[in-house]
Amino acid sequence: MTTNCTDEQAILDLMAKWRSALERKDTAAMMEDYLPDALLFDAKPPYKIEGAAGIRKVWEQCLPYFPEEFESEHRDLRVHVDGDLALVYGLHHFVPTPADHPCGQTWVRITIGFQRVDGRWRVAHEHASLPFNPMNGQAWFIPNPNELTLPDYTAGGCEGECES
């Protein structure tokens, strides 16, 4: 049995490997550490993608719209390991060249569930999301995770009914 620190580092290493594969647009390498029945709850429709093959297909459909050069960045990651299950959550962001490319508009909240199978950590579940303004249903972008901004809820049509 390995220690939690060793497991945490192994998982962070897998995430770095995935980022590198993403930046190369190498979907085969991106999917190397996914379980065949992995499940993705994505930030964009459809709300779920079942299976590693389906997740790979989504990336293959998206990556042609990315700029030739971009970086993939995670921050504020927290890793929790308990036996053969691990949970990672934090933020993910694309840093595109040119900087004004739409893929770099926001940070996305992420949660990844890992399962150790035959001694190897594998992705069992991913969840990517954006907060939303409940008054108008619009996504609330995270341009700077160092600033916890809030929408003007009164501008969403509740006219004082929403004030606490």
Image: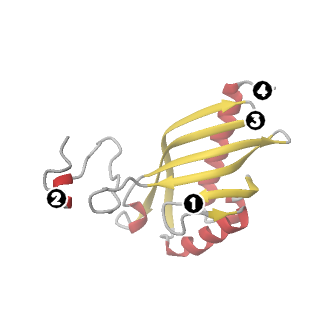
Q: Secondary structure at mark 1?
A: helix
Lower position in the chain sequence, tag 1 or tag 3: 1
Q: Residue at x 67, y 63 (%)?
A: 50
Q: Which residue is mark 4?
A: 2
Q: Which mark is residue 155?
A: 2
Q: Please indicate, yes or no, whether residue 99 appears anywhere in the rendered image.
A: yes
Closer to the camera: disc 2 or disc 4? 2
Which corner quadrant holds the N terminus? top right
For residue 48, which quarter of the picture? bottom right
- In this view, the residue in front, 67 or 58, is 58
Q: Secondary structure at mark 3?
A: loop
Q: Is 162 above or below relative to 61? A: above
Q: Is 19 above or below relative to 54? A: above
Task: Categorize mark 2 by other alpha carbons within 10 Å: few (<14), some (14-19), many (20+).
Answer: few
Q: Residue at x 51, y 54 (%)?
A: 128
Lower position in the chain sequence, tag 2 or tag 1: 1
Closer to the camera: disc 1 or disc 3? 3
Q: Amino acid at mark 4?
A: Thr
Q: Which residue is mark 3?
A: 84
